[in-house]
Image (tube, rainbow, N blue to C red):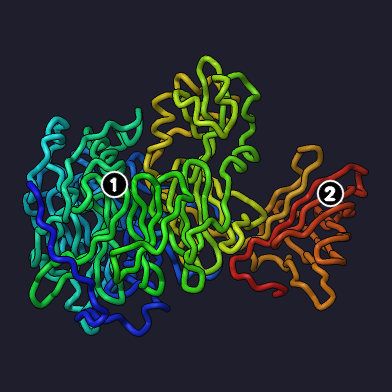
Amino acid sequence: MKKNLLALAVLAASSGVMASDTMIENPRAGVYADTEWATAHGGPRNDDYIAAIKELPRYYEQSAEVLEGAAVLLGPTRGPNGHFYATTGMDKGHSNMTAFDGEGNIIWQTTPWQTASDFDPGGVIAAPAVDKNGGIYISDANQMWAFTPEGDVKWVTELPEPTVGHSEVFDELNLGVKPNSITNPFFTMPVNGDESTAHVGGITIYGDVLIFDRETGELVAGPVNMPGEFTTKLLTPAPGAMSEPFAADGWGEVIWTYFHGGVESANVPAVNPGTGMIYATGTSSKVPGDGAIHGFTFDPETKKIDFVYEAQMGPGSGSSPAISSDYQYIYASDEDAVLYKYPTSDDKEPVWTSNVAGRPASASLGGPGDDKIYVYDERYIYAVDPETGKETWSIDMHDFADQLLPEKVGSTPNLCEYNAFHNGIVVSTDNELVITGVLGYKVGLEGCPEASMSSDTDEGSDLLQTTQIQGVWTVDPDTGEILRDGQMIPAEDTNEAFTVPTTDGYLLMDRGVLNSGVNRAFYPMTEGLFAEGNKPILPQGGVEILQGADDIKITAAISGRVMFDESFAKEDSTLRLEGKSSNGKLELKGDAEGQRDVSYKVNIKSNKNGRDVGGDIEIKKDKKTIHKIQISQARFNDRSVEGFGVDKKTGKKVNFYVADWRSSGEKGDK
């Protein structure tokens, strides 16, 4: 059935929806919870930006795991009470919505799924949205839910039948309930600052816009179907991806279909805090087969939804839209990975289009004063200039693979290419970016085709892909330089969506069981190709929680044999990296008490901005000197010093590394 396009009209800034005076300073506008991650892309603009984090911890260690055994695809989001919320797609007898704290303690869970009235696996494709009062809003396959911070059901409202009818392609899956999930909830902006006029809404997988009263759950507007025509297509997952027991039988196919463009609405709507316009990518009503950025308004007085904006793109819709920090522009990509920049008030012509990335993906934005756009493809991460659409810098994930994987491409007849790419969303803070990637190989069971030995070729598509390492890095947004001396934060399972840092030092990684699930499917064929310590990652699922450490770390080794490797809490030692003095010198000095009555005294100095390093490291046991390492050669890094020296007690060469892992950023304190 052909859908009628509502008359196009540009939403004027004089709309009844008014922006707060502090919108630019507070990205969590309107009734969105003012936390690090209140909704799927952080906040209303889908910017993936956390303003409250000024500096990340220097060092992370795993502190907890939660929901192991379940694929977690989006989130978790966080409420004002500090609790995190995540959805899963588990089978009957399991809960599919969980609240937990930073220590991995489960606070509450929904009633285990048994009947159509329970919270079912349909919520797995969305992240809960949290409002300022701590209310949690999420859809499952057939109902819209609201929970209190304590886990009580505030209200639950049945979702209406799709205006286009349920697609028969899901019938063969025996899902237990017909999927009609809202892909990700959003909040409308308050009118004239009156938060009671802010509603919760969403777009279903069939493209129906629904608006609910936040307090009562009443469906006050909709369903109104998005312009354009679309035919739902059931897509077959990669072997092992999001499969049982990590997702309920059949729901892996639904998840894969959702994430790979088989449904009309699969992205997160963006809300303009300045005008209240809501934007979502979908199908063009003007050019069959093409995509578009649609914009619609909601009037809380008349309860009317109006589609008034349609910016054209190429084939399909490949990303969620993101709105610039000044609210003037919107970014989205099509299925050909062309990135578009449009004015939020004019849908006629793009400001520019960019072909920088080779893969459609949601763009992340820097904060006010940066506003670079961050995108990625099967190998590179790119920073895009917001004025020109040109590449500013790029990061080659194959460089990480070459540095960190113990077996190099070509070192055996089966290791044909690196398989290294960014596998989540770039998250930006005030001074750093958080990127996440998998490192592995493309392998040939019978050897490598000649053409595939070049990592720049597209040949060898029949090669199996494996993942050996999942890592997180921090990046300087201005230069693309890897921070923290290039160190990787390791993870135990693959992350397919978000890695979320918090103001209290946590780092949360959802585990979607996509790349690791594929590893599991082919493990019997591939594990014998790799040496011990370099096997493919096997899936665990759940959420991995890492805790930032405020520590000093000191390590030394002789010919690979570790002499000592200890960490010291900041308050337990005086070991500090001193800032530059007026003459440009650097110092790393102080004392620390280790284990087993061992103490350390460090006195390392540079003469010329990190060069011409000298000094010594003295190690005592029971107050008797057992090692005294005289520095031979070393260099200062960000907040560390590494090099080698000679142990005056043994005459042997010693490699050493001393780092100040403080998160606070102050230097020279005692």
Q: Secondary structure at mark 2?
A: strand
Q: Which mark is residue 316?
A: 1
Q: Quadrant of residue 476?
A: bottom right
Vertical arrangement, residue 80 with respect to residue 395, above or below: below
Q: Is residue 66 visible?
A: yes
Judge from the rendering whether residue 644 lies leftward or rightward of residue 28; answer left or right: right
Query: What's the CA distance linking mark 1 and mark 2?
Result: 56 Å
Vertical arrangement, residue 380 with respect to residue 552, above or below: above
Q: Which mark is residue 644?
A: 2
Q: Which mark is residue 63?
A: none
Work out whether residue 413 or residue 459 is closer to the camera in this orientation and state it. 459
Q: Give the position of the C terminus as an image quadrant.
A: bottom right
Judge from the rendering whether residue 200 lies leftward or rightward of residue 427; answer left or right: left
Task: Give percent across and percent down for residue 632.
Answer: 89, 52
Q: Quadrant of residue 475?
A: bottom right
Vertical arrangement, residue 520 with respect to residue 651, above or below: above
Task: Give percent across and percent down for residue 178.
Answer: 12, 42
Q: What residue type is disc 1 on?
A: Gly
How many circles with numbers are drawn on the protein? 2
Instruction: Give the residue drawn at x 50%, y 73%.
Output: 369
Instruction: Give the residue drawn at x 32%, y 67%.
Output: 44
Instruction: Give the residue drawn at x 60%, y 43%.
Output: 400
Going from the N terminus, do you reach mark 1 or mark 2 first? 1
Vertical arrangement, residue 148 with respect to residue 163, above or below: below
Judge from the rendering whether residue 431 lies leftward or rightward of residue 286; answer left or right: right
Q: Secondary structure at mark 1?
A: loop
Work out whether residue 583 or residue 555 is closer to the camera in this orientation and state it. 583
- CB of mark 1 within 8 Å of CB of mark 2? no
Q: Quadrant of residue 186?
A: bottom left
Task: Give percent across and percent down for residue 435.
Answer: 51, 53
Neighbor class of circle 2 (other Cα within 10 Å; few <14, some 14-19, many 20+) is many
